[in-house]
Amino acid sequence: MLRRHRVIVGLLLALMCGVLFAGVLHAQEKVELTMSVWGMPWEDKLYTDFAIPQFEAKYPHIKVNFVRFEDYWNQILIRHAGGTAPDVMRNADESYGEMRIRGALLPLTDYVEKAGLDLSDFHQIAIDALTVDGELWALPQDLSPRNLLYYNKAMFDEAGIPYPTADWTLDDLVEAAKALTVGSRPRIQRYGLTWSEAHFLSTAMLGFGGRLWDENGMCDVTSPENAAGLKWVQSLVFEHEVSPNYLEVDPGNTLDLFKGERSAMHIDGGWSIPSVARDVPDLDFGVVPLPQPLNTVLGQCIWTMSSQTKHPDEAWLLIEFLSSFDVLREYWQLTWVAAPARLSIIFSDHFQNITGIEGHVPAITDPQRLEDLTGFWNTLIGDSRFTQDHVHPYYGVLKNSFLEPYSDELFGRTPGDVERILQEIEDGVNQEIAAF
């Protein structure tokens, strides 16, 4: 009897040890998440050297695998189709809509509410652009103007023209561009104004009172207001002769004209400011919002969750952390390619402390230079012209497949037929939407 009792006790002890051992093994098991990003390679240091180590220290049961893809947007869609999408994806506001309608993303509304996350620290326009049918689909990382006016201060000083301000009108812009243009076709030595991307064309359409989409989400660009916006841009090239046509200068190379002091003013996104300061350190330039009534179109990098993740709770913790005050403060101070999405950073002393990344992103120590290159945020944060009217699942199709290709005709040797081109763009985009 005693021997049988000992056997039973022994079996119970073994079972208890087995349970405890299994519990230890379970506690040691890590949840693995894959996180993908796009952007400049030197931005990786923010994640690999700062954000991920701090996150893993805070949540030791989670391991984050950091990946970067070439041909990012196609790779994300391909991996989703193959069932291997990253758990957490750095996305763009103009691109996430396509992933959303393909069922590639999970909404974050329930996680935000459960965590009690205060969304009022994010710019309202940013949250509105990421909210569809009452669901929040991403958290913002940054705020980035698609179009700002860069100007060469020395050229303005030489011509005796006051520097541009946020109160400038289109007439002010044209008159300054005419005064700053040197030479005439076919031998223009310096252009008064250049621009980089098709974003400027959609900005002009919106600024003249047009729209890109109707109430049903269909492309709607054939209005007289949209035509007026494009014709005004054409006037810069063909009437006032202050800007190059697309045969004279490829729009992809116009930023180099500004860097090389062959254009006095340049329209580009906020993300190019650090690269100009780095590549031409002696260039004394400033940046202001576009003249009225042109809208300042806001772009965002955002964090989204894959609908395929096996660990949505842990993926949410990573998204929440990547949008936290400390990470976004570091993002701004290291890279300053775009303002952090949190207003509490923009309105703090942290915003004035730009340390940069040695060899890649310059630091700013001079208060006047800081004002010249980042002071436009004081205007934009409260500006009613700050808009995200472009955000739509098919904005990428509109811009990349139609507006950019047709730009060669709009701004070729002679001005293209604006009304006909807008009709062909509208028809083409709507055919794409209907075929989805």
Image (cartoon, grey):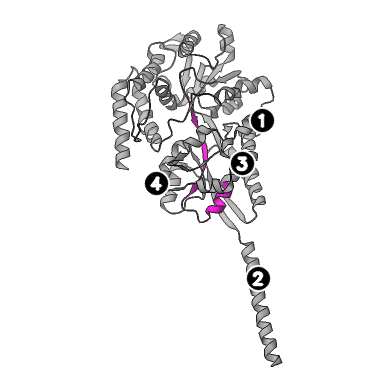
299 in magenta: yes
The residue range painted magenta reads 292-318
Q: Amino acid at mark 1?
A: Ser
**Disc 2 to disc 3, C-alpha distance:** 37 Å
Secondary-structure class at tag 3 = loop
Q: Nearer the viewer, mark 2 or mark 1?
A: 1
**Disc 2 to disc 1, C-alpha distance:** 50 Å
Left or right: where 175 falls relative to 23: left
Rendered image: mark on residue 102: 4
Instruction: Name the N-terminal-most of marks 4 and 3.
Output: 4
Instruction: Name the N-terminal-most of marks 1 and 4.
Output: 4
Whether residue 67 appears in this view of the structure is: no
Rendered image: mark on residue 17: none
Q: Nearer the viewer, mark 1 or mark 4?
A: 1
Q: Amino acid at mark 2?
A: Phe
Whether residue 124 appears in this view of the structure is: yes
Q: Residue furthest top?
A: 160
**Residue 255 horizontal/vertical position (percent):** 50, 23
Q: Amino acid at mark 3?
A: Ser
**Disc 4 to disc 3, C-alpha distance:** 28 Å
Q: What residue sits 64% from the left and 23% below the top?
A: 370
Few, some or many C-alpha atoms within 10 Å of disc 2 (few <14, some 14-19, many ≥20)? few
Rendered image: mark on residue 348: 1
Nearest the viewer among 292 and 370 is 292
**Residue 387 horizontal/vertical position (percent):** 47, 28
Q: Nearer the viewer, mark 2 or mark 3?
A: 3
Q: Which residue is mark 2?
A: 21
For residue 231, above or below residue 428? above
Q: Which residue is mark 3?
A: 324
Q: What residue sits 49% from the left and 22% below the top?
A: 267
Q: Amino acid at mark 4?
A: Arg
Secondary-structure class at tag 1 = loop
